[in-house]
Image (tube, helix red, strand yellow):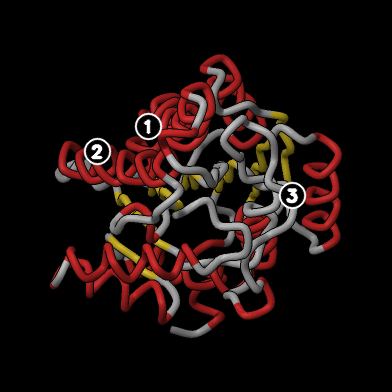
Amino acid sequence: MSKKKLENYFRNKVIIITGASSGIGKGLALEAGRMGAKVVIAARNEQRLQQTADEITALGAEVLSVRTDVTNKDDCHSLVERTLQRFGKIDILINNAGISMRAIFDQLKIEVFEQVININLMGTVYCTHAAIKEIIKQKGTVVGISSIAGVAPLPARTAYSASKFGMYGFLTTLRAENINRGVHTLIVHPGFTASNIRKVALTADGSPQGDTPRKEEKMMTPEQVAKHVYRAVYSKRLILVLSTEGKLTYLLHKLSPRLTTRITYWAMKKEPNSPLV
């Protein structure tokens, strides 16, 4: 599809993006601005959120920045209310806010597991619940930025994988409930993407990991992910799996779950300072 078709489709669409202060979320926000959408960005870090807002404004697009903790139901409702006050509608909600972790389950503090579930899964539930009636009115789109860890095991990431599998179950069922209402639901499974998610990933005691254990420069960029996501929204796709590694893992796990489990275990064990034994 042409760039002009995409721009015509998304121009003046009101798009809410959570976790928009960095990584994939920021990439999605900037791409929306380039296409002439009215962009609503949400995240906890106000300073980085403002930087993203300034970059969108520089593109000539309208932007609303709302500090939001997606684990807080009131914050999610406030995000929707402020969007309606400013723009009067919601066409697309992109649930992107998320956090990762890296630890063996038997060494992991249960509070860390709960934190990951609350941000990744419940954050998606809270924001979608706050916005769904408006999206139904517009026959709009709900997007969940999941992960290959939402369709195949990722050792040393039990909480992260559980949250993404949960997102898949929630959004596919939401799709089924609204099949006759014109609501489009897209689940995106990126492979490893260059971002700071691994640097801030939680360790067994809840402290941030710090250094990434992977070669970020060899990964898909947030900008590339964003372009794929908006094409998928335009085409009304249901599932989007990204990167060669991601697609191979997705297909292989369908064909041979036992083999996929072994392969992912050995791949994750090779990471620097891997907690796997």
Mark 3 neighbour density, 10 Å: few (under 14) some (14–19) many (20 or more): some
Q: Which residue: 66% across, 28% down?
A: 68
Foreground disc of the pair 2, 3: 3
**Which residue is farthest front?**
277
Q: Earlier in the sequence, mark 2 or mark 1?
A: 1
Using the rendered image of the protein, determine whether residue 105 is visible from the camera's viewpoint: yes
Q: Which residue: 49% across, 47% down?
A: 94
**Which residue is farthest bottom?**
2
User: Which residue corresponds to mark 3?
Assistant: 210
User: Which residue corresponds to mark 2?
Assistant: 174
Q: Which residue: 28% across, 69% down?
A: 250
**Nearest the eye: 152 or 41:** 152
Measured in 3D between alpha carbons, the distance from the residue under mark 1 to the one under mark 3, in whole angstroms, is 36 Å
**Nearest the eye: 131 or 37:** 131
Residue 245 image position (x, y, % from top left)? 41, 77
Q: Are marks 2 and 3 in contact (CB under 8 Å)?
A: no
**Nearest the eye: 119 or 269:** 269
Q: Are marks 2 and 1 in contact (CB under 8 Å)?
A: yes
Give, as a three-letter code, the residue at label 1.
Answer: Ile
Give, as a three-letter code, the residue at label 3.
Answer: Gly
Total count of labels: 3
Q: Quadrant of residue 187?
A: bottom left
Height in image: 144 above or below 73?
below
**Which residue is farthest top?**
74
Q: Which numbered disc covers residue 132?
A: 1
Foreground disc of the pair 1, 3: 3
Mark 1 neighbour density, 10 Å: few (under 14) some (14–19) many (20 or more): many
Mark 2 neighbour density, 10 Å: few (under 14) some (14–19) many (20 or more): some
Residue 58 image position (x, y, % from top left)? 85, 60
